[in-house]
């Protein structure tokens, strides 16, 4: 059960050592509470007198023994006690895969990392609209758009490293998975070179999740037993077209609208049949999600007004989606209804 309580102007006593309690203190202050601190069992407040009867006691799990008697006395007096996790060690970087852009596909580990962050550097494909409800950290937009890179990749890496060296917990929030065309390997290398502790939290890649949002399975028994994921940022070579056409299975292209014409023409030259089914799924899991289905020989005309972010799917699995379209549309309608009810 989740309860939302208005803490504006309420006195909250946060217990626990300063390093462990720093995130909890910030969360309650952001919520509008008047926060007092108790850093050691039986000790005194480090920021003034303690409230005689706080509205809430937030007990941070700092690993110190001796807190239980105090917390039991609070409970016996009818003062609610909230258990709070300890903040992680200061001065590290966490690369977080944010999935295809909806918080419903954000992992539990990702949510915990955001909760523990001091600063979040995010891009436009991550679920950034909901960040204020997921983290009290400083939020910095470092997103790159086609032809517009306000912060270079090296600049992003420098910002991350400098923030971590300054003792801050850094989250680099990306769309999809950091290691699937996300330049996560480069950012890990930059942290390692600077001596900054770094870890990676995998995300749900759009290569699988966005086709699924349109009802397209990337593999299907007796239809496709393999799939290949390709970056669409730059045109492929003739050799690459030949390899892809000869592999069979399903081809998934991420961010491929800009090179769609070259891709379709190259695969045709490599021998792929003109009637191969193909889908363009725009804005997966976001408002305005749209799926355009055509054949390899006609897709450039059918998708003339499609824009990124989009995922291209080439293969007979697209026909599976057409057969199951009624089920997919019903599921999407139920999701929209559930979202509207939750927002009511």
Image (cartoon, grey):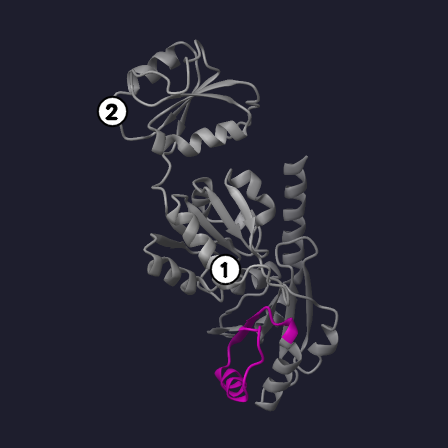
Q: Place residue 273 in its image quadrant.
A: bottom right
Q: Earlier in the sequence, mark 2 or mark 1?
A: 2
Q: Place residue 61 in its image quadrant.
A: top left
Percent position of residue 337, x then y: 67, 44
Residue 59, above or below 96: above
User: Is residue 91 visible from the viewing direction of this image?
Assistant: yes
Question: What residue is rendered at 55% in x and 24% in y?
Answer: 5
Residue 147, above or below 241: above
Percent position of residue 93, x then y: 40, 51
Question: What residue is rendered at 34% in x and 12% in y?
Answer: 73
Name the disc covering residue 155, or none. 1
Per the image, label 1 sits on a secondary structure element best described as helix
Question: What residue is rendered at 58% in x and 44% in y?
Answer: 130
Asked whether residue 243 is drawn in magenta, I would say: yes
Instruction: Tell me the crowding category of disc 2: few under 14, some 14 to 19, or many 20 or more residues within 10 angstroms, Cα based.
Output: few
Could you say which is closer to the camera, residue 147 or residue 15? Answer: 147
Question: What residue is rendered at 51% in x and 84% in y?
Answer: 240
Left/right placement of residue 53 relative to residue 277 reads: left
Q: Which residues are magenta?
A: 231-258
Measure how far apart labels 2 and 1 are at the Cα level.
Answer: 44 Å
The answer to whether mark 2 and mark 1 are in CB contact below 8 A is: no
Q: Place residue 48 in its image quadrant.
A: top left
| Residue behind mark 2 | 65
Could you say which is closer to the camera, residue 178 or residue 228? Answer: 178
Q: Nearer the viewer, mark 2 or mark 1?
A: 1
Name the disc covering residue 84, or none. none
Percent position of residue 207, x then y: 53, 65
Per the image, label 2 sits on a secondary structure element best described as loop
**The C terminus lies in which quarter of the figure?**
top right
User: Is residue 95 visible from the viewing direction of this image?
Assistant: no
Left/right placement of residue 68 relative to residue 4 reads: left
């Amino acid at each position: 059960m989740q309860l939302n309580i208005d803490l504006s102007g309420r006195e909250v006593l946060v217990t626990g050592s300063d390093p462990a309690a720093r995130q909890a203190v910030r969360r309650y202050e952001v919520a509008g509470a008047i926060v007092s601190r108790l850093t050691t069992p039986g000790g005194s407040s480090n920021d003034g007198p303690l409230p005689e009867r706080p509205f809430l006691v937030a007990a941070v799990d700092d690993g110190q023994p001796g807190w239980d008697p105090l917390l039991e006395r609070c409970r016996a007096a009818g003062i609610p006690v909230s258990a709070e996790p300890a903040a992680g060690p200061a001065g590290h970087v966490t690369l977080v895969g944010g999935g295809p852009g909806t918080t419903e596909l954000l992992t539990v580990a990702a949510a915990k990392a955001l909760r523990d962050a001091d600063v979040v550097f995010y891009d436009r494909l991550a679920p950034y609209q909901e960040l204020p409800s997921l983290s009290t950290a400083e939020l910095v937009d470092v997103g790159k758009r086609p032809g517009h890179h306000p912060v270079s990749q090296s600049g992003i890496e420098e910002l991350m490293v400098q923030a971590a060296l300054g003792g801050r917990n850094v989250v680099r929030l990306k769309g999809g998975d950091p290691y699937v065309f996300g330049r996560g390997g480069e950012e890990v290398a930059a942290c390692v070179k600077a001596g900054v502790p770094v870890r990676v939290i995998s995300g749900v890649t759009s290569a699988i999740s966005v086709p699924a949002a349109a009802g397209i399975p990337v593999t299907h028994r007796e239809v496709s037993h393999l799939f290949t994921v390709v970056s669409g940022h730059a045109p492929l070579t003739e050799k690459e077209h030949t390899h892809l056409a000869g592999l069979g299975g399903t081809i998934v292209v991420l961010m491929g609208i800009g090179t769609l014409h070259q891709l379709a023409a190259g695969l045709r030259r490599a021998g792929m049949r003109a009637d191969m089914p193909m889908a363009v799924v725009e804005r997966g899991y976001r408002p305005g999600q749209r799926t355009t289905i055509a054949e390899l020989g006609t897709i450039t005309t059918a998708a003339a007004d499609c824009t990124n972010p989009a995922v291209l799917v080439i293969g007979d699995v697209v026909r599976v989606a057409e057969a199951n379209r009624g089920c997919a549309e019903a599921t999407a309608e139920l999701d929209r209804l559930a979202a509207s009810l939750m927002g009511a």
